[in-house]
Amino acid sequence: MVDMATEDSLNHSINIALKHYSSMFFLPSFRKAVIAVALLCIGVVGLSTFALFLSVEGLISSLFFGFSLFAATLLFDYVTSKIVFGNDPIYVLRRTVALSLFCWILWLFFIILGVIFGTIFDLWWWIKLCLLGFAAVLTFRSVVFISTSSVTILRRLLASLLQPLLSIAVFVVFWMSLDNAIPLQVLPFFIISPIIGISTAYLFTFLIDRLGQRTYGIPSMPLFRAFMLNWVAGLNAPFEEFLEKLGENEDIEVTLLMFDSHKPKAAIIVPLVHPGPFKNIGSSLLPSMLKHEFEKEFGCDTCVPLGILGHELDLASQAQNHKIISHVINSAKFTASANKATPFVKVTEGFATASCQVFGKIALLSFTLAPKTTEDLPQQLGHLVREEAEKHGLNCSIVVNAHNSIDDTIDVEASLETLCAVASQCLEKAVSLPSYPFEAGAATVFPEEFGLKDGIGPGGITAVVVKVAEQKTAYLVIDGNNMVSGLREEILSALKAIGFHASEVFTTDTHAVSAVVLGSRGYHPVGEVMNHATLISYIQEVTKTAASTLEHCKAGCMHMIVPKVRVIGKARLESLSTLVDKALQRAKQTVVPIFGLEGLTLMLLLALL
């Protein structure tokens, strides 16, 4: 059987990791964060003290106290963001203010509890619980900055200390108005609690780091920071450094089909590379990058559909993308000679469909399981199809996974035998047909309404139209990660309505659309959130444009090997993704004993004051 379980497992692991990271940085806007901090500092923390000093003077003091806390918070959030962190792309002012908002929510628990006990017993309960809240906030900030920031450790420590220290200084000034002796009495706590808090934060992060080091040979926190830099700022290099270290060298196969008239007319390029794992990491952008660079060099519309493979061949970095692109462009200068083609044919057995068209001794063959889910197919299938094509005298084969249908139902698995059988029948049917001179045309459209969040990558929609005798066929390639079930059939019907006799729809499986939205998959397949009528109008437009450029052409095929390309396999990708979840589990296991011990120590210290 074509086992998609491991593929589903990997995609699930990546999506779980993305959800953990994205939830940490799903923050309010700067304006909302500032308003919330003002309400907490002035309206809650400040006015809560009025319960301890019920008088007009107490009300004025409480409001001034709250406003001072708000001003101190904003001032040192600005200093932290602009001076301490400088060019750190994560901690812009919005995020430092949002972090302070969460810190005030944490601190508020201790303050309100202190006010309650202060009104029942005496003011020392309020003071001691405010101090305990200060220590909790300092520890929390230390954990956050140690884990996520990439600035020097001294800057991280400074960022951890600044806002809590200035805020507690406002408290101390307020307490001095009550009793000048209070600062001296709490001084030991100010000296010892930051040491305890920072040490506890380091112990906590060390234990999580150790999990990654012991299990996968990489520390968890640097990986965490690298992922953050990509999620928040779109920086790919830090995370790709890990992939390069963990990867291995492989020889990558690329097959190129070109149509030439008096100049290059169109190109279909199928690299045996999986365009993942997500966003702009690794080979996620390879389909659109290869398309644009090839078009720039040869001046012809180009498309890059998915080959027959899975996540076992994700590239480790964008540097490896450029290695493949350079090799393809440098190798593509050849003369096309096949001046005849057979009509386009399809064969369906069960729910497996193979499509084929033969140009001279070149076979262009594709698979789909639509309307069932069509995900990644095993490399073995591609090898078997090439062997079968050679038996029919075809010396070059371009084998494509249409990757054009996905739904949320339990998928029926297709057997490798069925897929090979339908391919064999399709090849036999195609080669048995007479060949005729053919025409080819191509065009690309970039829909203005749709972007990465909608499921369309930067490669847009490319149509390659082939006319053989009276048959006009459209090969439509959408730069996206799969399509909702049923949309393929809508598109084929719409193309037939405007004069195309037989067609097929492909997606590139680009993972550039992954990790840009939240959801069960972490991306939107083509058609899930976009208007189908609008999409189909673009498709009809681009196929008509391609048909208007039809010229008599010759076809040429080249099979090339790009040596020593750094790839990151399925097992390594899954281990990196599951490390996130395991680190979170380790954090849950250690958070109570570590911070509970810290709390007991601090309470003992407060009891001695």
Image (cartoon, rainbow, N blue to C red):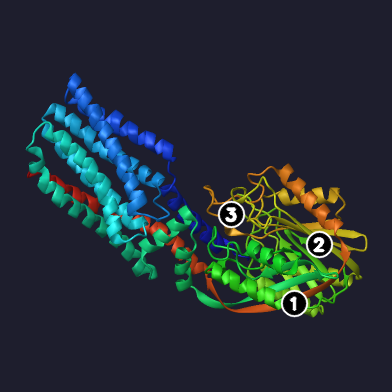
The label shown at residue 333 is: 1
Pick the front one: 150 or 583: 150
What secondary structure is found at the residue carrying circle 1?
loop
Local crowd size for mark 3, using a 10 Å CA cut-off: few (<14), some (14–19), many (≥20): many
Question: Is 148 situated above or below 286?
Answer: above
Q: Please give left or right for residue 389 compared with residue 383 in the image.
A: right
The label shown at residue 346 is: 2
Quarter of the rendering occupied by the C terminus: top left
| Residue 243 at least partly seen | yes
Q: Earlier in the sequence, mark 2 or mark 1?
A: 1
Quarter of the rendering occupied by the N terminus: bottom right
Question: Cα distance, mark 3 to mark 2?
Answer: 30 Å
| Residue 306 at least partly seen | no
- Could you tell me residue 561's position as x and y percent? 65, 79
Please, what is the three-letter code of the amino acid marked with disc 2? Lys
Which residue is found at the position 18% from the left and 54% from the top? Answer: 195
Q: Please give left or right for residue 362 compared with residue 511 in the image.
A: right
The label shown at residue 528 is: none
Pick the front one: 27 or 567: 27
Location of residue 381 by image quarter? bottom right
Local crowd size for mark 1, using a 10 Å CA cut-off: few (<14), some (14–19), many (≥20): few
Please, what is the three-letter code of the amino acid marked with disc 1? Lys
Question: Cα distance, mark 3 to mark 1?
Answer: 32 Å
Question: Is 80 situated above or below 368?
Answer: above
What secondary structure is found at the residue carrying circle 3?
helix
